[in-house]
Amino acid sequence: MKFSSLVERISGTGADVWLTHYAAVAARERGEDVLILSVGDPDLDTPQPVVQRAIDSLLAGDTHYVTASGRLALRTRIAQVHQARTGQPVTADNVVFLSGAQSALFVASLCLAGPGDEVLALEPYYPTYHATIEVSGARLLTIPTGAGWRPDLDRLASMITPRTRAILWASPNNPSGMVLNEGELEVIGNLAERHDLWLIADEVYASLAAGGRTPGLAARCPQRTVTLCSLSKSHAMTGWRAGWLVGPTPLAAYAEQLAMCMLFGQPGFVQEAALTALELGDEPQARARAYCTSRQQHFSRGLKGITGIQGIEPEAGMFMLLDVSATGLTGGEFVRQFFAAEGVSVMDGAAFGESSARCVRVCFATDERTLDEALKRLRRFCAGLPAARG
Ligand SMILES: Cc1ncc(COP(=O)(O)O)c(C=O)c1O
């Protein structure tokens, strides 16, 4: 049987990067002694009032069809939270509630680019970007990082052509934890204005940056900026699939139509739970920030003295890149051998682009006992590598 050309665009390397992670999950289900540090899912519970609201909504019969873009009260609240965080004046008409920031990116991708177009993403980039952009028929081109994991903005400028439709980035970055600064954003904003480009800002980790904010371009370039955000990381709600996009009203209208084709609306009880989460104020986000900061410090301390490993301190987020080049292994070799020898899954840095191919990514948002055990196994594994012995 024949499939559409789309199936090739959504498979391949982007999908392969999760193989060790899936092997680890399968091993854990078989009862094996594995440690999973390969996925960004904080080891925190969803706030209790959020869970309670979902239960109450279900019991009250909130189990029917809902509007495709999300309930007005929820979109209004998202607009207020977005405005307070970014300074961009918006209303519910700028917001579409979707199944996580991931589906918000999917919707933005299909609405903003298509065959013959190019989207430029700053490395290191989140591994689903490739398939999620290319599903539209557009090509994703990535911009290697400059010094110190900062974006190489000259390279970005040199890669803009008449085919370019958008610039895409995550700030704080996954996996480097880098936060774009005002000067860098100024350059990106100027490029977008000069070449009439969309700006797609993935801000799922914004609440984990200092003060719960990350500099952005939404207020300065409201007609060309699409902000993707969710409750996954800020409120420990990865499994609820509660996210949104905020953009100019024509885009929001198209996004609603696409959501209609694809989702027919997010469950009402999830929307009520999301509204409750946003009504809790800063407390859940402050909790997530404090949690990540303390785990990062704990993990960084434990890394000291491990042969061949250089930790790259993030500015924000729940990940750390470890440069493993001194072990003589690539990131991919390190991931496979470390998992085979010690049952610890981490992610190949190459999954995030060439710039991080000499690294592996660790998610440190877990309990200290797990981190200590992972560090013990990392120390043992590295000590046994030929580069360390030599
Ligand atoms: C940079 C980045 N963007 C988007 C997502 C998807 O987030 P969500 O759970 O809101 O779909 C993730 C998830 O890890 C991510 O790291």
Image (cartoon, helix red, strand yellow):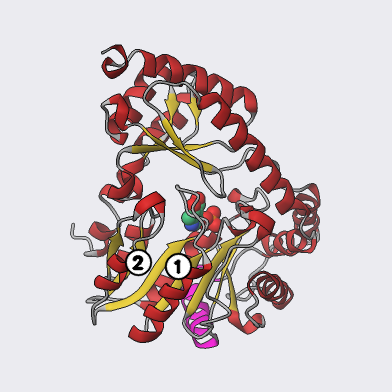
Q: In the image shown, does 258 or 151 lie closer to the viewer?
A: 151
Magenta-drawn stretch contains 55: no
Local crowd at mark 1 within 10 Å, few (<14), some, or many (≥20)? some
Residue that badge 2 annotates? 153
Q: In the image shown, does 294 or 12 lie closer to the viewer?
A: 294
The residue tagged with tag 2: helix, strand or loop?
Answer: helix
Residue 158 in the image: above or below residue 379: below
The residue tagged with tag 1: helix, strand or loop?
Answer: helix
The residue type indicated by label 2 comes to: Leu
Q: In the image shown, does 145 or 253 lie closer to the viewer?
A: 145
Tell me where residue 117 sits by quadrant: bottom left
| Residue 242 appears in the rendering | yes
Tell me where residue 321 sits by quadrant: top left
Q: In the image shown, does 213 or 269 lie closer to the viewer?
A: 213
Range of magenta residues: 249-264
Magenta-drawn stretch contains 262: yes
**Residue placed at 57% from the left, 64% from the top?**
229
Mark 1–mark 2 distance (CA, rounded to whole Å): 8 Å
- Name the side, left or right, on which 76 lies relative to 305: right
Local crowd at mark 2 within 10 Å, few (<14), some, or many (≥20)? some
Residue that badge 1 annotates? 184
* Tag of residue 171: none
User: x%, y% of residue 377?
Assistant: 47, 18
The residue type indicated by label 1 comes to: Glu
